[in-house]
Amino acid sequence: MKDKAYIGVAFVVLIFGIWTVKEVKSRYFTKADLYEIGPAPKFKLTNQNGKTITNNDYLGKVYVLEFFFSTCPTICPKMNANMLQLQDAFYNEKQFGIASITINPENDTPQVLKEHAEMLGVKIPNWNMLTGDKNYIYDLANKGFKIYADQNNKALGGFEHSGLFALIDKNGTIRCRTDEFNNPILYYDGTETESVKMLKEDIKKLLKE
């Protein structure tokens, strides 16, 4: 009987402890807050107008960064549509920007990217479609942002990538929401409607900071 009593007491203590931790967390970190992952990797690339663009060009702006390629036949059309939604939602916000970095720079020259931007309907001045050295870009994606991108001749279009969007604040810090356990989600799924809806809400929040 004593053993059962001890087990019962231990169980109550455990439940109370879990509740207390959750209660303490809820006081200091709510779902409305945006987690700070750390500084976004630095970059220096060329945009669709042949201009050199670095991460410093985005300081003071809230921006969304992606890795894509212009001839992508799979997830990029959906990503493009969602980026256009963001453009429309924040069209008049001078402190909002987008960085779209190609993972096929051998094809996606500044001229190709300019034509691609015109075809999509890119209108805001702070939406840069960026190209550069292939190895540099792959290091930036996989080692820097840790957003998967790779060349794969067996994949449709010859390349594969994750389709994730990174959200970066005015200070150059990567920001995100947390899950129900207060773990950072890191990035937003650029192919999912609900994820993009959350991204819009979070951009609005960061623009006010």
Image: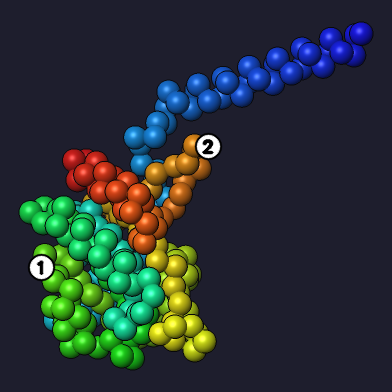
In the picture, which quadrant includes the C terminus?
Answer: top left
Q: Measuring from the top left, give residue 63's x and y in whole percent.
A: 24, 58
Q: Could you tell me which quadrant the N terminus lies in? A: top right
Label of residue 123 in the image: 1
Q: Name the residue furthest left.
A: 92
Mark 1 → mark 2, Cα distance in angstroms: 39 Å
132 lies above or below 165: below
Numbered circle sitting on residue 181? 2
Identified by mark 1, the residue type is Lys
Residue 75 or residue 131, whichever sits in front: 75
Position of residue 143 in the picture relative to residue 129 (left or right)? right
Say which of 91 and 74 sits in front: 74
Q: How many numbered marks appear?
A: 2
Mark 1 or mark 2, earlier in chain:
1
- Visible residue check, residue 55: no
Which residue corresponds to the image point at 21% horizontal and 44% vertical from the top-left? 204
